[in-house]
Amino acid sequence: MIRATQCFLPSGSSSAVARLAGFPKPLCSVKTPPRWRAMSRPRALSSSSNKNTASSAGWLSAGLAWYATKLDTHPLTTKCISSGLVSAAGDMICQYLTLPPTCTDSSSQHLSNTSWDMARTGRFACLGAFWVGPVLHHWYGYLALLSKRVWVRVAIDQFACAPIFVTSFLAWLWWWEGESPSTLPSRLQHNVPSIVLANWTLWIPAQAVNFTLVPVKYHVLFSNFVALLWNAYLSYTSHNSNDDNSKSASSQEENSEPGEET
């Protein structure tokens, strides 16, 4: 009964009741140390990290909303601009990874070979904006109307369109860089098969994902993300083949000189 009524007594009278009932007085009160109380509380995330995450998510959602609006109002122009920017970015990545950051030789020729080639990046940007963007815009729309089956669209895209598209892109690029029309067909014949095989390795699974999960409206945008890696490879391969051709041509000239003298 004393324990039952102790709950209803005013504050401070419970100790007196305990003494009357014969209970010993506690030596000390048990309290939780402040350090333990702090450890028992759940830690909240810092406000700065929450703000940074929210701001980045806000910028991303706003950018996607802006891009979707531009696709509705100016679809061709938007895809051309994005394709041009991605093509330029791919070439810049290639130059950053393959060219030395500094130049140790004082000769101007060595400096021109190791510095960033702005004209080369500009050519990739123009081809992406005025060739890749318009072609993909109309081609993806045609594929969506041609068949609803993913494997049919992937097969037509990669085995009918990709070889022609890769050949035309390289022909435009090399011709713009000064390749002679007489040597351009042989260079294409020598380099296009290996580049098309690399294209199939990357783009067949990428287009399967694109045609399965991505709406037709965003097909070019998805291709632009994949093309960031592809353009870096294409930039390296196209200009590496140019160096190989120049070396082979110079070696042929050196081998032909002794024969002409005799």
Image (cartoon, rainbow, N blue to C red):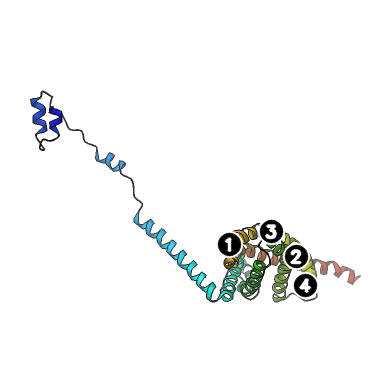
Residue 14 can be seen, yes or no = yes
232 left or right of 193 in image: left
Q: Is residue 19 above or below residue 71?
A: above
Neighbours of disc 4 within 10 Å: few (<14), some (14-19), many (20+):
some
Label 3 sits on residue: 151
Whole-Å distance between the Cαs marked 1 and 2?
29 Å
Image coords of residue 129 (percent x, y): 61, 74
Amino acid type at image mark 2? Val
Neighbours of disc 1 within 10 Å: few (<14), some (14-19), many (20+):
some
Label 2 sits on residue: 192
- Please tell me which of labels 4 and 1 falls first in the chain: 4
- Please tell me which of labels 1 and 2 falls first in the chain: 2
Whole-Å distance between the Cαs marked 3 and 2?
24 Å
Which quadrant would residue 86 be assigned to in this image? bottom right
Q: Where the C terminus falls, by quadrant?
A: bottom right
- Decide which of 177, 259 is in the foreground and name it: 177
Whole-Å distance between the Cαs marked 3 and 4?
34 Å
Label 4 sits on residue: 184
**Residue at 64% of width from left, 60% of height from top?**
207
Image coords of residue 34 (percent x, y): 25, 41
Check disc 3 and report its element: helix, strand or loop. Answer: helix
- Please tell me which of labels 2 and 4 falls first in the chain: 4
Check disc 4 and report its element: helix, strand or loop. Answer: helix
Q: Where the N terminus falls, by quadrant?
A: top left
Label 1 sits on residue: 214
Q: Nearer the viewer, mark 3 or mark 4?
A: 3
Check disc 2 and report its element: helix, strand or loop. Answer: helix
Amino acid type at image mark 3? Trp
